[in-house]
Amino acid sequence: MNIKEAKVIITGASGGIGYATAKLLKEQGATVLISSSNHERLSTAAAQLGVLSFKADMANVQEVRDLFAYAIKEMDGFNVLINNAGVGWFGSITTTTVEDFQKMWEVNTRGVFVAGQEAAKHFKEQQYGNIINIGSTAAVRGFAQGSAYAASKFAVSGLTECWRAELRPYNIRVVQVNPSAVVTDFIEKANMSLGDTTYKLKASEIAHTIVAILAMNDVGFIPSVEIWATNPNRQ
């Protein structure tokens, strides 16, 4: 698509991958609306980027729906959804609480579903659209201490495949981007450490990938892509 014609909703965009993607899209001429559950951080990010914003907690179904109503009103429609919002906690199967498991499902899976549902309604009407789900390498393979997080992200892979099959006849491209560990505040919030970050992925690399996927001529699309750091042996 022509990025200058993109009208983009990005969830979870007050920092990290969402912020970097909003920045790059805005620089290339797109109209961008960012959302986050944190009003203060969202307001700061929107002012820095010069984009529209709407506070929405992805765990709150009505707030997600209100986000899309706002986008249609303020941008006169939209043609891109970047489903980026996500949370993570990591622990053994015996120490992960049901509450933590539920919270990750509410944001990482149900929130993605509701956002995708609202986007699909609009895209089917206009016979065009782009949905990019930000998954994780945890969406394609499990790991120790990752039961709740990987389960929520594996579900995103299932949603992506189903939407792709269902929406493709309506000229809607559905893509999943699966980054490995990225240096963002997500790591700190998840109580993890990446150690030496010299050879780790930055949010800008993921943003570059997302924009490149969107910029492909509409006759084609990339169903999914995994993004790894070039030196996986460094910790």
Image (cartoon, rainbow, N blue to C red):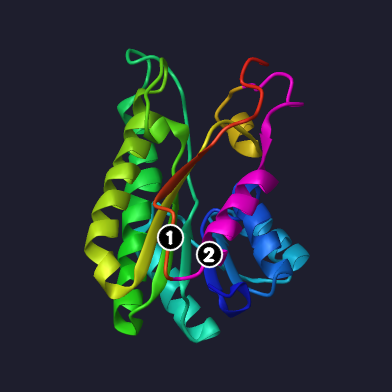
The picture places residue 125, in percent across and down from the top left corner, at 30, 82
- Front residue (pair 41, 223): 223
* 206 horizontally vs 108: left or right: right
- Front residue (pair 152, 44): 152
Marks 1 & 2, CB-CB < 8 Å contact: yes
Segment tinted magenta in the rendering: 193-218
SS class, disc 1 = loop
Identity of the residue drawn at 42% across and 17% down? 145
Give the alpha-carbon distance from disc 1 to disc 2, as whole Å.
Answer: 7 Å
The magenta stretch spans residue 46: no
Residue 188 visible? The answer is: yes
The picture places residue 112, in percent across and down from the top left corner, at 37, 53
The residue under label 1 is 221
Residue 14 visible? The answer is: no
The picture places residue 55, in percent across and down from the top left corner, at 54, 63
The magenta stretch spans residue 203: yes
* 217 horizontally vs 193: left or right: left
The residue under label 2 is 216
Dot 2 amino acid type? Met
- Front residue (pair 223, 62): 223
Identity of the residue drawn at 34% across and 45% down? 156
- Front residue (pair 20, 91): 20
* 133 horizontally vs 161: left or right: right
Q: In the picture, which quadrant includes the C terminus? A: top right
Q: Label 2: few (<14), some or many (≥20) within 10 Å?
A: some
Q: Is residue 68 above or below residue 34?
A: below
Q: Which mark is residue 111?
A: none
Q: Is residue 176 above or below residue 43?
A: above
SS class, disc 2 = loop
Q: Is residue 204 above or below residue 235?
A: below
Identity of the residue drawn at 46% across and 37% down? 136
